[in-house]
Image: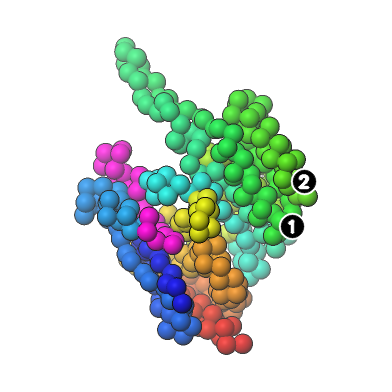
Amino acid sequence: MASRKLLLLPGDGIGPEAMAEVRKLVALMNERFGAGFETEEGLVGGSAYDAHGQAVSEADMAKAMAADAVLFGAVGGPKWADVPYEVRPEAGLLRLRKDLELFANLRPAICYPALAAASSLRQEVVEGLDILIVRELTGGVYFGEPKEIIDLGNGQKRGIDTQVYDTYEIERICGVAFELARTRRNKVCSMEKHNVMKSGVLWKEVATATHKARYSDVELTHMLADAGGMQLVRWPKQFDVIVTDNLFGDMLSDVAAMLTGSLGMLPSASLGAPDAKTGKRKALYEPVHGSAPDIAGKGIANPIAMIASFAMCLRYSFGMIEEADRLEAAIAAVLADGLRTADIAAPGAQTIGTTAMGDAIAEKFLALSAA
């Protein structure tokens, strides 16, 4: 069997604790099922800055380029609040996304039945929620030029960020959204701000043309991004796949994440274009949550988002669909059994720690694999 090359980048804060639970699953799958995973590890974020003076070293970037998939934990924390902007912890993640050309960010928002009551919205609004936000990741205002602060004199400065999109960037991200919708409920809602932004006008034009040319079997609707945020908290189950740009995708996906009750529950995938020869995509998988430095090292962090990110890795990078399904089912089963980490527990309820949650999911996964 060909090897499956994984690069693990635990990062900072609770990242290493959550990644440890994925590391156990990788070892289990190799031992029990001959999965053939080969793993390397590296540093990213604050830990990389402490070791190398960079948010990610050239050596670890080379490992990322050679890997079939990268599993990423979390970066940042107060310790690195005053480091130079160019080497801040988040710069490591941005470089990985840019150098690996990971243009498509997939952010599922799923409300597990056992946690419907944990959402800040009414249970009937979120119960059974299953939506997917497809965010363009390498263009837009985060990468557009010019990007600078200009001294105007007389104590005045001007901050400049530039929103830029080319036709091909919009075509390819919309293509990903339409393709994914065909595997789900066949509905895409494109969100932008064509009423006030020229990039939004182009986005809507290109999304419409791409749909007409290749995906007319998929239902396409358009919505202004601010109205989309309102609709996400009013009646989120109206959506299936949402496709949007880098800036609005950043905000809308975090809104959608909180519908489920906790950022600690949700994974994400960032994918590149298929290689012309092999058909493989560069890919990075990460939990939605941050580094949570206030609870780092206490053994109480929720590892579910990191484990679910590994399930997405199995699905999208290795075509291990049955294994991905079983791992996601194991998460749901453990929650149905009433096991909770502190972030998703009802007030006064008994909780378990990071390791115990990871062990419980691994045991369920093995039981489902043997069934």
Quote the CA–CA distance across marks 1 and 2.
Answer: 14 Å
Residue 224 seen in this snapshot: no
Q: Is 165 in the magenta?
A: no
Residue type, label 1:
Arg
Residue at 42% across, 54% down = 290
> Mark 1 or mark 2, which has the lower sequence index?
1
Residue 107 lies, in percent from the top left, at: 56, 54
Q: How is the image coloured?
A: rainbow
Height in image: 75 above or below 18? Answer: above
Q: Nearer the viewer, residue 142 or 289?
A: 142
Residue found at x 42% / y 50%: 100
Which quadrant of the structure image shows residue 249? Answer: top right
Residue carrying label 1: 185
- According to the picture, the residue beneath numbered tag 2 turns out to be 216
Residue range of the region highlighted in magenta in the rendering: 65-92
Q: Amino acid at mark 2?
A: Ser
Left or right: where 40 falls relative to 266: left
Q: Which mark is residue 108?
A: none
Q: Can residue 49 be seen in this snapshot?
A: yes
Q: Position of residue 150 (x, y in %)?
A: 35, 20
Q: Residue 281 in the image: x percent, y percent? A: 50, 56
